[in-house]
Each structure stands twice: as C-alpha cells, then as structure tokens.
C-alpha cells in the first residue's frame, strides 16, 4: 500500500493521530503544544470523525488542572480521552496523573517537552517538564523526529490499551513540535489496524456506569494501601514487552522498525552516547559522519523512558562499549545527577549484577540544549572527544561557556557533519513580510512534488511587532537527521536590506554560497551601500551575489508590499533545488491552488509577480576590494550602562549564545529601564508634527503605546540654542500665553502602528 | 543553660520554631500537616511574637496553590515566609517551587510526608509527596524523630538564609508528626543565636521594592536560559557545607551533634541499611540490638537528601561495608528503582570513580512502610538477613506479603528489639471516651515530672462515630527510638468491654503482662463473660487481670459517662510506672491544673473519681481453664459475598495488614454496597417505636443519617407469620384504611446520634 508523503510539523502529526483515536479531547493552550489543540478543535468543528465514525468532543477548560480533571473524569466514564500540554501545564496535571495511573487507565497525553519557569520563564524546549512527571506511574515514550511523532503517537495509543498503563508521548518543544518535515502519512487503515476494538471495549467496560456499579477512588489506610500499591507490578513489568510487540506489529504493517532503545553506530563502538529527543537525531548524524571517518562511536536512542527496561537497554549496547556519556536535556539542581544519567548508571550496575554486562563501563553525564539551546554535531563530537580522555569530566555541560563552575566542555565550533549534497538555505525576514509562509510553501512544493527529503525550521524573536524571523530549510536526496539550525548555509536570502546593518546575516554562509538580497539599489549601486563586514564576507567567501528590488516588483504587479512570492521565485530561480522551468511551473501551480478561491485576478497578479521577478533578478559583479566606509551599527549606544553594554547588547545583536554563565544574574534579577537602549528602527513611516494643524490636544501623546511622542510647554529662552530644524509653536493655553509648545517624535522607537494618526 | 523538657508532637515542634522565625505564614489545611497551621494561627491570634518582636501574619488561602503563590509573593517583598503542607497540597506547590528555587529565595516549607492518591487516597505517611519535588531545586532535609524536627526546623531556617537555597524540612506524616515525645525544647535564645540578622537583612534587601527597583521573573530565550540556569551551581555546591556548618554551630550551642549522613552501628559493619525518616530510628534500635548480639550491622541515616552530597555520603559509610540495602518509603512504578536507591547507586559508582571507595558494594533497594504501614525491628532484621545471602533480592518489599510478583522478603514476625525495661502500654478506647486525652496527660505527667523518656502514639480508625482508638505508650529510662506500634505490651487496658468480642485485644500482650478491663461485671462474675480466646490468652500468657467498673465510678462521682480519669488512675495504680502514691498525687496535681478554670466543684469531682477508682479496682483470680462457651463474633455474617468475606472482613477485624497483594483490586475498583455487611453495634441506646404516640409522619425515617429506621404500609395478611414481638398498627392514611403500618429499627446500624428523637 502506498502512503502519501506530506510535509507537516510534529504538532500536526500528533494531533492527526490523536484525533482519529479519541472521543474526548480536553485542552488548554500552552506553547508549544497549542497547535495540537487547535488542529483537534478545527477538525472537530469541521466534523472530521475518528476511526469509529464519531466526531471527538473537544473541550477547552479554564486551565490545565481543569483539562486533567476532565481527562480523568471522561476516562472514568470509559471514553477514549487525550490531552495536549507542556511545561507548567503539565505540572498542573500531576495530581490527576497519579490517580489515572493508579487506576490503570488507558490514555495518552501528547507533550511538547518544554522548560519550566525557574530563574526566568521560557517557552522553549527541554525535558524539565516531562522529567517532573517521571514518578507518577505514567509510561514515557519519546519521539525523536517528526516521522516518529506520527508513528509513536499511534504506537502509544495502541500500547496504552494493551498495557492499561497511561502514556505520555513526548517530543522536543519547538525543535520537533515546530519542525516542518516531509514524512510518510499513516493511513486511516493503518490506524484501524493498530487499534484493537476488543481492547477498546474492555476500556469502556471498566467505565463507571449505573449498569455495572463499582466504586473507585476510595480511601485506604495503612492496613492495605501498601499491598494495593504493589498490585500494579505485573502491568509495569509487562509494558516494555507490550510496547516492543506494538512496535513490531507496526513494523509489519508500515515497514519502519523501532525498538525501545535503538542503537545506531559501529557494532564495535568503544564510546557511546545515550540520549533521547531531537538530540538523538543530531547524534546519529554525527556518529555516521565520525564512523565514516574512521572512528568507532555509537548512539543509543532512548524511546521508552518509563518503564525503564534495564535488560533491553543493556542488551542494546555493543559489548565493546568502554565509556558512555548520558546526555540530559534538563537540570535538576542539587540532584546526584540528571535523571537519564542516574537511570543509566543504575541500569548498568544492575546489568553487571545480573551478568548481562561483564563490567561497569565508565559513565559520565552531562546537560545540553536547555530551553532549545542549539545542539549540534560539533557538540556531539566534543562529547565523544571527552570520552577519549583518561578522566572525562562528569556532570558536564555542552554548548555553553561555563566560566563559573567550569562544567562546560570545549568543542570545535567549526566542525560540521552537514551533507555537502544538501541544499541548506537560510532566509532573513520580517514577521509580517510573508517569508515564513513562502518558505513553508517551498517545502511543500519540494517535499510533495519531488523525491527530495525536506525540512524547515523557523526562528522567531520575542518581539511582537517588526520581529525578525530566520527560516532554515534543508532539501536533499537523503533522510535528514539535522535537528539543528543551519550553520553552514549554501543559500542565504536577506529579505530586508536594513538587517545588514543590524545582524551578521552572512555569518553562516559557506564558501561559494549564493546570497540573495532584497535591495532598493540595483546591481551597479548596491555594493556601496553594504556595510564593510558584509563586503568582506562576500569577497572572502566567494559568494554568488544576487539582488532583486522585491518591493518594486510587488508594487508594479499589484501585490502591494507583499514580497513573499517575489522572493520565493528568486529562491527557486537561483538555488538549483529544482530545474528552473520546473520550479517556476511548480510555484505557479501552487499559486493557483492557494489563491483560486480569491478569484482569477489574484492568481494573475501573482503570476505577473513571478514573471516580473525573473526579469528584475540580477547577479552582482562582486568587486575584489572592501570599499565601504561604514559598518554594522552598534546594538546599543556607547553611553548605555555596563550591564546593557555587556549583556543586553549581545542579546539584541543575536549573540546571546556567546554570553558566558558569569554574565547572567544568578537569581533572574535584572536592572529595569533597559528597553530605552534598544532602538529598533523598525518602521518605514513615522508621524510628522504639523504645527499648523495641531490643536495641542495631546491625544497622540496619550495614545502611542511606545511613548514615541512627547509634548512640552516651555520658556522661549530655551530655543536660543535649538538647531534650526527644531519645530516649535506658541502654546495655546491661557495660563502659558508667553510659552512655546513642541511635540517631538522619536523615530527609532516608533513601530509604525499608526494609532497616533487615526 | 538548662532547657525545658516538654512532651509534644512533631507538628507542634516544627510550628514552635517556624512561628518564631517568620513574618508571613501562608497556610491551607491538609492532613497530617494541619496542626502546624493551627498552632501558628492560634499563636498569632494570641499575639505571640517572633524573635524580632512582631506577630507573624497567618493567612489561610483557598488551596495550597494559593498558599504557594502567597509564599512566593511574600518572599519577593523580602518577608521571611513559611508554609506547612503535605501530599496533594505539596503537588499544587510544585510550579511555584521551581520559581522560588530558581530565584534563590530563602524559605522553609515544613512538610509532613504523606502518600499520594493513586489507586486510592490515603491520609497516611510515606515519602511519595516529597519525592515528587526532588527535582525542583529545593533542598530536602529529613528529620527522623520529634527532637530532630525541632532541631532541624531551626537548622533549616538558619541554613536557607546562609545558602539562599529554599528548604523542604520534612518528617514522616503521623508516625512523627503525631508522635508525642518528650524532647528538649529550644529556647528563644537558641533561636536568636542561630538566625543571623545580617542574613535576614540581606534577604530583605533582595525584596522587590520601589526604592530599589529591579525586575525578576523575565522571559528567557534559547540564547541565555541555559547559561542562566547554570549560574546557581556555586550555591548548590556550597549548601551541604553550609548545612554541616549550621549543624556544628547548633551542636556547640545545644549539644546535639548532627551530620548530613549519620552512621550508627559497628565501625566494621559488613551490612548497612540506608534509610531516612522514622524508619531510621527503628533501624538504629535494631542495629544496636543485633550488634549487642554479635552481628556487625549499621545504619546510615540520611538527613540531607538534596543537595545529595556524594563525598560526605560515601565517607560516612564504614570502609568494611560489603552490602547495602537502601530503603525507600515510596513507590515509583516504572522507574529503574526507587529514588533513594538510585541516589545511593549513583553516589557509590561515582565514589568508586573518585577513589573514595575501593569497589562498588552490592547494593539492593526495597520499599517499606508505604502509607504508614508498620515498619518494625523484625522487618529490619529481615532486610539484614537478606543481605547475608549470596544473591539478595533487589527491588524487594518488606512488611507485606506480595504473592503476585513475589517482591516481599520473609521475616520473623516474632522478632522484637524492645527494651524489656520499658513500660509498653496499650489502651483500647472509643474516640469519645477520653482515652487519648487521658493518655496524653499521662505522658505529660511521666515525661515532665520524672527523668523517664516518654512516647505516645495514637491510632484512630477511619469511622467518624464510635471509632476505635488504640494508644501506644512507652516510658523508660533510656531514649526511645521505637517508631512503631507496640507489638509486645506489658500493659493492656480495654476501656470498652464490647471490644473483646470484636478485636483481638490481647494479641500483643507479652507473658506476664497486666490486663485492665473496664467491666460491668465484678471480679467474680467477669470470667464467664469473656470470649474463649480472651480466656485462653489470659491463662496462657499468665496475665495479671484487673477489672474496674469505670462507668459506675464515673456516674457515682458525678462525672457522667466520662471515664478518662478513672481509667488513668487505674493505669497509674497498677502499671508501676511511678510509685503509687506519687502517681496519684501527680494525677491530682494535673487535675487541678486542667480543671481549675472550670471551678473547684469540677476539681473535687475528679478527685472523688480518683479516690473512688482505687476502691473499686479489683484483681481477678484467673481460673486455670477456658470455660467460655462463646468466642469473638465474626466480623461479617456468613452470607456476605466472597470479597466481603475475604477482604472487608479482615479489614473490619483489624487484620487488613495480613491481606496479601492478590487480595486487593489492581486498580482501586471495589464492589459497592459493602457497608451493609458491617454491623457496627456501637450505640448504647437505640430509638424504640411507640405505636401509641406515633403519628406516622415519617420524619424519623427521613432524618436518620444511617437509614436505620424504615417504615412500611402493607396488607395485614403478611402479619400471619410475623413473630409475636413484631409491632404493627393501623395505617393512618385514608387511601390505606385497610392496611397496617410498621416502623422498624435496625439497632446494629444505629450510631446513637439521637437525631430521630429530637
Ligand atoms: S505610529 Fe504607533 S508607535 Fe509610532 S508614534 Fe504613532 S502611535 Fe507611536
Ligand atoms: S439515633 Fe441516629 S442513627 Fe440511630 S436511628 Fe436515630 S437518627 Fe438513626
């Protein structure tokens, strides 16, 4: 049976399965899990049904505590019930989770693993939330990639019915939940084949009902609670076997064979990394690269984290393993070690005791990737290098510079395991300029119309208005395990000229890469308008440099300021992902599909934009010398206080990753009033004060949300030294008849929201 | 400096310290922590001040989530803030705990460790709740006894200010929280000496205030969250040292020297148990007993659980240690092992790696004492015996019979490490008859008026009305480490004659023990009214048997049905805890103190009861043969269904501890309608239907909360076969003019609440 290839992110993949096998879905939105609830809600409102032909009831509660209570309650009626959550939301579910597990109730919670608020809040991904539930009695099944999310979602729903143990199915927040990937879509028949209706009936029969009255949730006293708590042992002992059986059944049906613990690498590896989540993909890519270059490394990818199956775990490791590094994507301050590390030490000590393993390997543990901190092949290599040492560092960190307690490992930042045959394209865009949408569309075109594998990941900054987005797209003939941002790009597009002065846009360009710039200046003028560091990189990295005046094309072809189609066309025209003609026809086909509903005129305008683009796309002849007399603007003015200079400025410039531990406050305490130093300069139009028209009502001052407009009434003597361009007029108040009035606008802070002129 | 000896329970001990060093106390009641909040509330309402002369603000919130938020908020203003909680209450605090710890905020949460609701709810004690917070970044300090609770409460409040790490100070729910012990009370000067005002000022200076504006609780992105999370390392690394320093400072001041990990036992022990909480006391008692009998055992008592100090832990173990059993008072289904076990395995593996320990000892882990399941010297010996085996069982349970997955260790139930010189007195009383109050008073008398050590523990059944209470009192010249119920009593008092038919009151009587019975029957008649099994035990165990008609004495001396003073007098008269004359004068002194406020007449009535008692207390001449023709009543009738016969009946009879794992439902699901089989027979007076007076309004039927009274209108033909005593009368309704009316009362279900006759 041939299955459709689709490009989607993990949230959609999980929701796609969960919606098909649920009757009740209790939700409360929390980043990065919200899209799962949104998809489920949308599909139910569209009357999409589950595999039994009924439309799941999607209920949004008042908090995750309510969602958990609803899940528990619905399960107790015998309904097939699921929920989606993360982070603090998951914490609010903990009390109910003990009960759901204690009552041996089949359910799956799909969790986008996310950091917990500690010294600061973070919406990004790590395993802190999931680890806070490891003692509840839930099984924990981890997906490492978008394909696994779809597959394991189904495996979890099948296994929970067989085992009666509730499951958390989790995957990395953002890195996996928001990664767009080309995957094979499971069919409704697949889902039907994996879910055993007999087990569904058994689940339903356990529901509380007046027809079959039983009591549940009683109080138990010291006389029997302990014995009752031990009754569940056989269920937990059986679960690893059940999950493996379910994986085997899945393999027979679909072809992809998974194991509780999947080992990838040299069969005679001496050094092995144990890791779960998207980091396992990165480690796999690195292991394959290193082994191709003569090393003997391996990665043990953890899928079933709870129940932890000691025997299967130990047996999955090569007998040759001498040293192990366990990577945890969480930090539990004051613990003996991070949780996966402690599991591995305990498991291996027991495996030695049981004769499964001859001697205890040297095991070290480390932290990586907290809160979506990048985890790259360079870091993986750093860990493998550490394992070579006679006394490798334990309780290390990788990926940061810990200059305080010196936990961090050094690693070679320049190391890369990227496949040279892969298209690696980075796009610098504005939140509002359509870059992300166009890129998602490009992935769909390439992913669904060709045999290429495709991946897209989108980084948003935290500013709401005028935010920077960088898109990271990979395309290529081989499966993609690169769950990290592109750091060696062979295509870079900058959709906003002004970025060149603010960000090091070309930092990740590799030798000979293509650079596409949206520029008001044509191929002959543009060079002189580039900051010197950009010129330098274009020359030294021998970039192929193209310009397009996208705003001009968009305006001329009636697209207004929407430059997405223009820039997308340029990408296809010069990136060589597809033959040019084929690419152009694919774009036009996609335009037709997208805009048909909005009428033929819109379609034609877009077609015109495509054709106009090709005419206005120019390669720039790159001079061989840096000629520019200016460089990038400093992120904050020189008079900013020390903390702002040192910390805030680095973060504004996009270099926060380079800040060492010592630069950050120990307890999340920050100085106030630092936003005054961040001049964002994001508007294209600012209000201008017209002294003739102004009635001095002051409403614009009041209404501006960014305090851009300030009014002042003052003694005329102060005008003596004012510059000639300084505007003033007579104050209109009787009380201040001898005074002057001025209204000043701070263009650097204006967001162009237009509230002041409305 | 001489300190007062006081008898109090651990809740009062913790509250006593917490109230002195706090400014804000946020509470929400949850068993078994509620008394801490109640004490604090009472003291503040009495305007008792803290060591700085201000009265702490005690605020009761709407849940523990609110209490945690209030704690976090108050701490952020710089207030010294505390709270008290347990179980689900603690779970609701988890989200705020991450923030409080992440922000390095000094506070102490006092927690009575309690089970979590899983297959059933339980109000009793184990470490499941505390273990659910071990990843939050809080330090966890465990007290094993009431004296330690007072001492460690102060040490925790001092250490949190020094370390900036928030503390959970925990102790076993009920077993420690409700154990009444004679302890040395710390003085206000002690408290003042331990709390450094400079550190208090520093804590206050970190508060958010308009005078010193800072920002806290920001959002952090992938660029800096990881580094910021690592900034706290030096604080966690310093904490074990700070706690030890604080313990040393405390030792200098008070004389009691504690360590992070206190080893007790043979310096050359080969077998060591690692344990924390009240179980550590039991293990200590057993170790001392075993070693006195030639064994080489030891116990490592864990005080500082987080941060776990690997080096100090490894160094506290004797170098001779060959095998270790780690006892966890919690169960985490699906885990690689219980938490303390995993900490010990990891710590020892690291200690071997660091060269602190030559080789990894064999380490096994087991569960004990869940939900206040008894943990006794016999069980400790069972564990030590297991450690002698070539292949000791790992992941064992002790104290139950696991006939399903066979985790349980066998042990010799008859083993006892009780000190023969200790008075071990058990009292069987009714919730309402004043037994517990009288016993608490006896402990005070003996504890505070003599040099004896004293301990009291009280077991309540879960029934609200007419509940059984058993009191377990120990007195003796040596410190008491027996944190378990008395199973070899040398004094047993039964305050309700009817108990003899329902409970095996004499089961725990040791050879030659004293048995005191409150009996309507005098010394010459009583024998024939005893069930045969009671007679048998009295003869075989050679008990000294006394009777008192306590209700008669109470009535005669104007005490109504309050028999507490009478029974207390008997205890002192025949137990030989104190010389009789001294004891009687102590009781009278105590009566004066207690009742003076209520007038001289009350005092004199009580004095009369004391004197009357001595006149009416008789020793029974025990026959040498069992003569009784009846025995204990079966707990449920023979026609009850199988589950009730097998499970409910055992629980009703007080033998629930003997139920094997297989007897209990796997998922907390129970049959309904089982209360019908439990005929409690607890009332002394039942309503009688007076056919003359009854107007057939039916209100009594409606009002009875136990459905004791049922009315029926029926065809007179059914009376044909009715017994002669069956009452009936003409129905008063026009519609039923030919019918009969009967009202029936089920005396066995009546609680004597009197609602029906009001
Ligand atoms: S456009 Fe918006 S941000 Fe700019 S000055 Fe007007 S109100 Fe302020
Ligand atoms: S005394 Fe109370 S329990 Fe007994 S019959 Fe009357 S109302 Fe019912």
Image (cartoon, coloured by chain):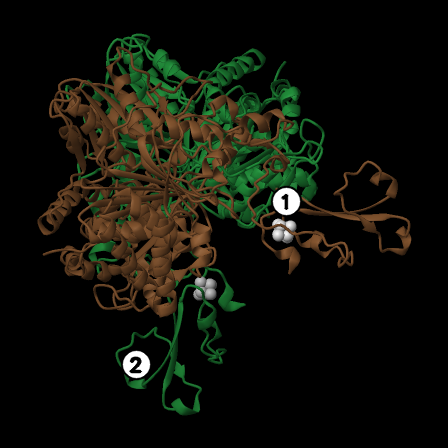
Chain colours: A green, B brown
Residue A726 lies, with reference to residue B28, above or below; the image says: below
Residue B532 lies, with reference to residue A421, above or below; the image says: below
Which circle marks residue A719 in the picture? 2
Q: For the residue labelled by badge 2, is the local secondary structure a helix, a strand or a loop? A: helix
Percent of width and height locating residue A396: 23, 31
Q: How far apart are marks 1 and 2 (CA)?
A: 101 Å
Q: Which of A550 and A485 is in front in this view?
A: A485
Specify whether tag 1 is near ligand 2 (CB below 8 Å).
no
Percent of width and height locating residue B678: 59, 36
Q: Which residue is drawn at 35% across and 37% down?
A: B127
Classify 10 Å Cα crowding around label 2: few (below 14), some (14-19), many (20 and above): some
Percent of width and height locating residue B606: 37, 60
Q: Which residue is drawn at 41% across and 85% down?
A: A731
Look at the numbered discs 1 and 2 and tell me whether their residues touch, using CB distance below 8 Å. no
Image check: A496 left or right of B592?
right
Of all chains, the one bearing label 2 is A
The quadrant in which residue A538 appears is top left
Q: Which of B561 and A685 is in front in this view?
A: B561
Residue A738 lies, with reference to residue A124, above or below; the image says: below
Of all chains, the one bearing label 1 is B
Q: For mark 1, what is the residue?
A: B747
Q: Can residue A358 be seen in this view?
A: yes
Q: Can residue A456 be seen in this view?
A: no
Percent of width and height locating residue B339: 32, 30
Residue A446 lies, with reference to residue A550, above or below; the image says: above
């Amino acid at each position: 049976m041939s299955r459709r290839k689709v490009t989607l992110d993990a949230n959609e993949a999980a929701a796609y399965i969960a919606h098909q096998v649920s009757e009740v879905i209790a939700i409360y939105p929390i980043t990065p899990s919200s899209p799962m609830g949104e998809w489920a809600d949308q599909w139910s409102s569209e009357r999409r049904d589950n595999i039994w032909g009924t439309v799941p009831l999607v209920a949004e509660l008042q908090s995750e505590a309510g969602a958990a209570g609803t899940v528990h309650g619905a399960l107790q009626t015998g309904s097939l019930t699921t929920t989606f959550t993360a982070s603090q939301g998951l914490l609010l579910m903990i009390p109910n989770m003990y009960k759901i597990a204690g009552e041996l109730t089949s359910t799956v919670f799909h969790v986008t693993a996310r950091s917990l608020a500690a010294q600061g809040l973070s919406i990004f991904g790590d395993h802190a939330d999931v680890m806070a539930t490891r003692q509840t009695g839930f099984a924990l099944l981890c997906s490492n990639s978008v394909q696994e999310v779809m597959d394991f979602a189904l495996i979890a729903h099948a296994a929970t019915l067989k085992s009666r143990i509730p499951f958390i199915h989790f995957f990395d927040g953002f890195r996996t939940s928001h990664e767009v990937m080309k995957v094979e879509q499971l069919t409704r028949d697949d889902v039907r084949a994996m879910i055993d209706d007999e087990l569904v009936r058994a689940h339903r029969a356990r529901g509380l009902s007046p027809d079959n009255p039983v009591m549940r949730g009683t109080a138990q006293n010291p006389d029997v609670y302990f014995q009752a708590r031990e009754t569940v042992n056989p269920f937990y002992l059986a679960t690893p076997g059940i999950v493996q059986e379910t994986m085997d059944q899945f393999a027979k049906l679909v072809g992809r064979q998974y194991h509780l613990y999947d080992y990838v690498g040299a069969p005679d590896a001496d050094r092995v990394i144990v890791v779960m989540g998207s980091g396992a993909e990165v480690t796999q890519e690195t292991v394959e690269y290193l082994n191709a270059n003569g090393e003997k490394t391996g990665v043990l990818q953890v899928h079933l984290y709870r129940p932890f199956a000691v025997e299967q775990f130990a047996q999955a490791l090569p007998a040759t393993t001498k040293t192990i590094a366990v990577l945890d994507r969480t930090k539990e301050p004051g613990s003996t070690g991070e949780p996966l590390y402690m599991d591995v030490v305990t498991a291996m000590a027991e495996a030695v005791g049981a004769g499964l393993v001859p001697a205890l390997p040297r095991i070290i543990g480390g932290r990586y990737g907290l809160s979506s901190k990048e985890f790259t092949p360079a870091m993986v290599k750093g860990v493998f290098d550490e394992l070579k040492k006679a006394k490798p560092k334990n309780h290390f960190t990788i990926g940061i510079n810990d200059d305080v307690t010196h936990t961090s490992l050094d690693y070679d930042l320049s190391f890369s395991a990227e496949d040279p045959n892969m298209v690696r394209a980075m796009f610098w865009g504005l939140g509002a300029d359509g870059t992300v949408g166009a890129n998602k569309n490009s992935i769909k075109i390439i992913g669904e119309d060709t045999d290429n594998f495709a991946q897209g990941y989108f980084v948003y900054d935290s500013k709401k208005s005028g935010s920077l987005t960088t898109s990271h797209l990979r395309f290529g003939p081989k499966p993609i395990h690169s769950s990290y941002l592109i750091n060696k790009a062979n295509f870079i597009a900058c959709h906003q000229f002004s970025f060149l002065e603010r960000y090091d846009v070309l930092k990740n360009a590799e030798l000979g890469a293509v650079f596409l710039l949206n520029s008001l200046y044509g191929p002959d003028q543009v060079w002189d308008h580039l900051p010197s560091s950009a010129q330098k990189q274009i020359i030294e990295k021998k970039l192929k440099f193209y310009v397009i005046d996208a705003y001009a094309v968009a305006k001329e072809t009636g697209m207004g300021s929407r430059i997405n189609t223009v820039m997308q066309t340029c990408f296809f025209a010069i990136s060589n992902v597809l033959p040019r003609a084929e690419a152009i026809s694919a774009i036009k086909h996609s335009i037709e599909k997208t805009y048909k509903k909005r009428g033929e005129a819109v379609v034609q305008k877009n077609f015109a934009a495509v054709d106009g683009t090709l005419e206005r796309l120019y390669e720039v002849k790159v001079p061989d010398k840096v000629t520019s007399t200016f460089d990038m603007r400093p992120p904050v003015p020189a008079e900013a206080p020390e903390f702002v200079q040192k910390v805030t400025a680095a973060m504004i410039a996009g270099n926060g990753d380079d800040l060492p531990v010592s630069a950050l406050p120990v307890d999340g305490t920050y100085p106030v009033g630092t936003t005054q130093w961040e001049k964002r300069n994001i508007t294209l139009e600012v209000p201008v004060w017209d002294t003739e028209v102004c009635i001095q009502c002051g409403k614009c001052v009041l209404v501006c949300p960014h305090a851009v407009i300030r009014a002042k009434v003052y003694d005329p003597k102060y005008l003596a030294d004012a510059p000639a361009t300084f505007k003033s007029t007579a104050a209109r108040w009787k009380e201040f008849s001898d005074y002057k009035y001025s209204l000043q606008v701070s263009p650097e802070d204006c967001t162009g929201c237009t509230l002041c002129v409305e």
